[in-house]
Amino acid sequence: MGWANHSSLMGFILLGFSDHPRLEAVLFAFVLFFYLLTLVGNFAIIIVSYLDPLLHTPMYFFLRNLSLLDLCFTTNLAPQTLVNLRGPEKTISYGGCVMQLYISLALGSTECILLAVMALDRYIAVCKPLHYVVIMSPQVCQQLASVSWLSGLANSLIHATFTLQLPLCGNHRLDHFICEVPALLKLACVDTTINELVLFVVSILFLVIPPALILLSYGFITRAVLKIKSVEARHKACSTCSSHLTVVVIFYGTIIYMYLQPSDSYAQDQGKFISLFYTMVTPTLNPIIYTLRNKDVREALKKLLSGKL
């Protein structure tokens, strides 16, 4: 009996953190705080980068895409998580679970590619400054953003659909707070070796190749920055690049831990807390890191708050 036959009637019981009842109130406050911070921070980035003509550059175009991604990603997961943490009712409908799975996979995969695109942008800005405006034209930026979004969507359609084909044999108790592939594979009552192999291959494509390219580009960037004679120019290059690198390390580090470890070594409780970090905390850190370390964004925010923008 497959997902659609059985689970459409039953939905899923999200066990979440029910084995830590005293912790649930703390986690509710934690999720609510970071969700509100995500909304404020990412909306602020989108608004100032759109309204301030000085921020109409490729870097801020991609940053606007990243903020939109993070807004949608967290909004897809946080409300349901808050409902489940607040009361005794810890269920999600079959349709809700499917939608959550498709959307989070699409947006998470898109972010993997987008961060690599942002590294390419920084590489061209630092290493080929004279050709930057020509290479990173508005059309090229839009094409690169489109490739990021479409690749994420394609991964989600293939991967989520493949996962949803697994028979559950009446098991609908999901030991997680969200509908996520590693937790869903544990519900299947058949051998999931092929699914785990597909998950591993997809993880290599989205979680190993992009960060490898990012590190390669930053190797070239570091070499170019060391050649810059102006201290101020060197500091500015280091500042924008280190902001991006911080986001990259936090984002990829947590997701690689989740998706690239053998299933038999997957500690469920540990996995839930790691998931909580990259679904709720990481989308908050992006605007904070970029804003605090970026003079242009700080100035634009001051103008916005003082009504000059």
Image: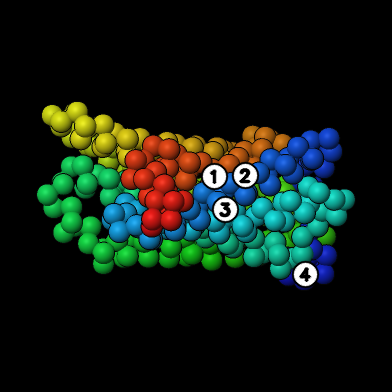
Residue 98 visible in rendering: yes
Closer to the chain start, of discs 3 and 1, is 3
Secondary element under disc 3, as helix, strand or loop, is helix
Q: Are marks 2 and 1 in contact (CB under 8 Å)?
A: yes
Query: Which callout, 4 or 2, points to the residue nearer the camera?
Result: 2
Residue receiving disc 3 = 39
Looking at numbered disc 2 in the image, what kind of residue is underneath it? Phe
Q: Are marks 3 and 1 in contact (CB under 8 Å)?
A: no
- The disc label shown at residue 34, or none: 2
- Rounded to the nearest angstrom, the CA distance separating label 3 from label 4 is 32 Å
- Rounded to the nearest angstrom, the CA distance separating label 2 from label 3 is 9 Å
Closer to the chain start, of discs 1 and 4, is 4
Q: Nearer the viewer, residue 152 or 79?
A: 79
Residue drawn 74% across and 51% down?
82
Looking at numbered disc 1 in the image, what kind of residue is underneath it? Thr
- The disc label shown at residue 8, or none: 4
Query: Which callout, 1 or 4, points to the residue nearer the camera?
Result: 1
Q: Percent x, y for residue 73? A: 56, 56
Quadrant of the image containing the N terminus = bottom right
Query: Which callout, 3 or 1, points to the residue nearer the camera?
Result: 3
Residue receiving disc 1 = 284
Residue drawn 29% across and 33% down?
238
Looking at numbered disc 3 in the image, what kind of residue is underneath it? Leu
